[in-house]
Amino acid sequence: MNTEFSENFVRSPGRLRDYPSLVLNADFRPLSYFPLSLWSWQDAVKAAYCERVTIIAEYDAVVHSPSVNINIPSVIVLKDYVKPVKSTAFTRFNLFLRDEFTCQYCGSAGDMTFDHVIPRARGGKTTWQNVVASCSPCNLRKGAKLVKEARMHLAKPPRKPSPSELLNVGRKFPPNFMHESWMDYLYWDAELEA
């Protein structure tokens, strides 16, 4: 799977590059997989100090205040459970994630846009059931035609994904940086192969 486009889609703030902390919900699952739920080490230390999180793994690195040495947290768990969202927001990012950042006509990745299966010029609506990820060449080729008229085929019919489906698709896109202490918490609930 080509993840070049997906990696460039989410821009990481500079402060997350150095010693990010993996944030787990109270059930020890990440809040999200893509983008991975990360906090800066500063936010993690502040939350631990305010007793909103429990630190369960640390980096070897230490930060210093005038009176205290603090090991930088690498994995933290929220003390209060955050309920997962019950519906999926219709956003460009979630649409691309549903379609795994690949064109639903040719399967390529890169230069993504979206396409109305039934064109708006023909009464098509901007909904989960009518919009798919598309590369620019396929989008131009299809234009205001129906899929059959353009002699194209959809990889899968568009539909509204559940939040858990998007969470599972997000697992396919590992972040650029993963600390070894995170591994036990990222995929522990994944289905085992026989």
Image (tube, rainbow, N blue to C red):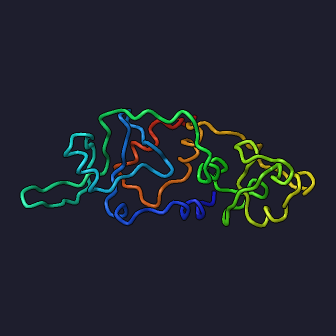
Residue 60 locus on image (x, y percent): 23, 57
* In-image side of 184 versus 110 (left or right): left
Left/right of residue 150 with respect to residue 117 in the rendered view: right
Instruction: Give the quadrant of the N terminus.
Output: bottom right
Residue 65 percent across, percent down from the top left:
12, 60
**Residue at 69% over, 60% down:** 113
Q: As drawn, is 3 to the left or to the right of 107?
A: left
Q: Position of residue 127 (x, y in %)?
A: 71, 44
The residue shown at (51%, 50%) is 34
Of the 4 image quadrants, the one containing the C terminus is top right
| Total number of numbered discs in the rendering | 0
Residue lying furthest left: 67
Instruction: Give me the residue at 34% from left, 63% from top.
Output: 15
Q: Is residue 127 left or right of residue 163?
A: right
Residue at the limit of the structure toward the right, as seen here: 149
Q: Quadrant of residue 169?
A: top right
**Where, by quadrant of the figure, is residue 53 drawn?**
top left
Q: Nearer the viewer, residue 91 or 141?
A: 91
Q: Nearer the viewer, residue 181 or 46?
A: 46
Residue 24 location (% of width, % of height): 37, 41
Vertical placement of residue 5 versus 75, above or below: below
Residue found at x 40% / y 35%: 82
